[in-house]
Image (cartoon, rainbow, N blue to C red):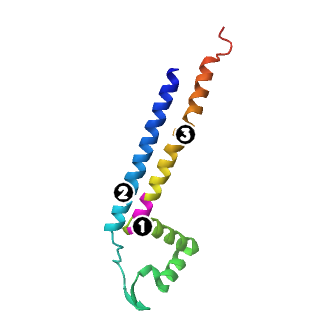
């Protein structure tokens, strides 16, 4: 009887922690999205296209890509693109989306653990009660 109460309390606590984590994650993501600006520093210049102005980044130039491929091959070009993409996840407005996704993943794991907790505890209790060969 004691295990049922402990299970219910633990499930409730895990659900509460998961909910709080989800709310804090989304709140942080919204705050970051509203206050962050996309940084365009490091540009070589600007180009106008369709009434909008875009920065020209050094990694977007054909010379940069040609030199990179010449020195490190196609693998170097792909590695450079991947590393720039990964670094970009942690700056500006994309950081807000990254934090929201991390909050969803972690809270989903906590909710999953809370939902499947009775099955885990029941299997542990059975193994203690069914001591094979002790008596």
Please tell me whether residue 2 is drawn above or below residue 84 in the rendered image. Answer: above
Q: Nearer the viewer, mark 3 or mark 1?
A: 3
Question: Number of marks in the image?
Answer: 3
Label 2's element? Answer: helix
Give the percent coordinates (x, y) of residue 35. 31, 67
From the image, give the main secondary structure of the stretch colored magenta.
helix
Reading the image, the residue beneath label 1 is 94
What residue range appears in magenta? 93-99
Measured Cα–Cα span from mark 1 to mark 2 = 15 Å
Q: Is residue 24 left or right of residue 4?
A: left
Give the percent coordinates (x, y) of residue 6. 48, 27
Reading the image, the residue beneath label 2 is 27
First along the sequence among labels 3 and 2: 2
Q: Nearer the viewer, mark 1 or mark 2?
A: 2
Residue shown at the point (49%, 71%) measured from the top left: 80
Label 3's element? Answer: helix
Q: Residues within 10 Å of mark 3 (few under 14, many from 20)?
A: some
Please tell me whether residue 19 is drawn above or below residue 91 in the rendered image. Answer: above
Reading the image, the residue beneath label 3 is 115
Query: Residue 98 lies in magenta, yes or no?
Result: yes
Q: Quadrant of residue 96?
A: bottom left
Q: Which mark is residue 62?
A: none
| Residue nearest the viewer, comparing 49 with 121 | 121
Residue occupying the far right of the picture: 133
Give the percent coordinates (x, y) of residue 77. 53, 74
Task: Check whether the beta carbons of the residues at disc 1 and disc 2 lie within 8 A of each other.
Answer: no
Q: Quadrant of the C terminus?
A: top right
First along the sequence among labels 1 and 2: 2
Residue shown at the point (47%, 48%) measured from the top left: 107
Q: Is residue 32 left or right of residue 9?
A: left
First along the sequence among labels 3 and 1: 1
Residue shown at the point (47%, 69%) measured from the top left: 85
């Amino acid at each position: 009887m004691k295990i049922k109460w402990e299970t219910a309390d633990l499930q409730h606590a895990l659900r509460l922690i998961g909910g709080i984590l989800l709310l804090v994650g989304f709140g942080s993501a919204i705050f970051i999205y509203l206050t962050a600006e996309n940084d365009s520093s490091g540009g070589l210049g600007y180009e106008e296209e369709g009434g909008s102005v875009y920065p020209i980044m050094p990694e977007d130039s054909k010379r940069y890509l040609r030199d990179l491929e010449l020195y490190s091959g196609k693998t170097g070009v792909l590695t450079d693109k991947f590393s720039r993409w990964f670094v970009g996840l942690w700056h500006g407005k994309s950081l807000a989306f990254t934090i929201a996704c991390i909050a969803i993943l972690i809270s989903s794991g906590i909710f999953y653990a809370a939902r499947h907790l009775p099955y885990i505890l029941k299997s542990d209790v059975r193994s203690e009660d069914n001591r094979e060969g002790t008596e």
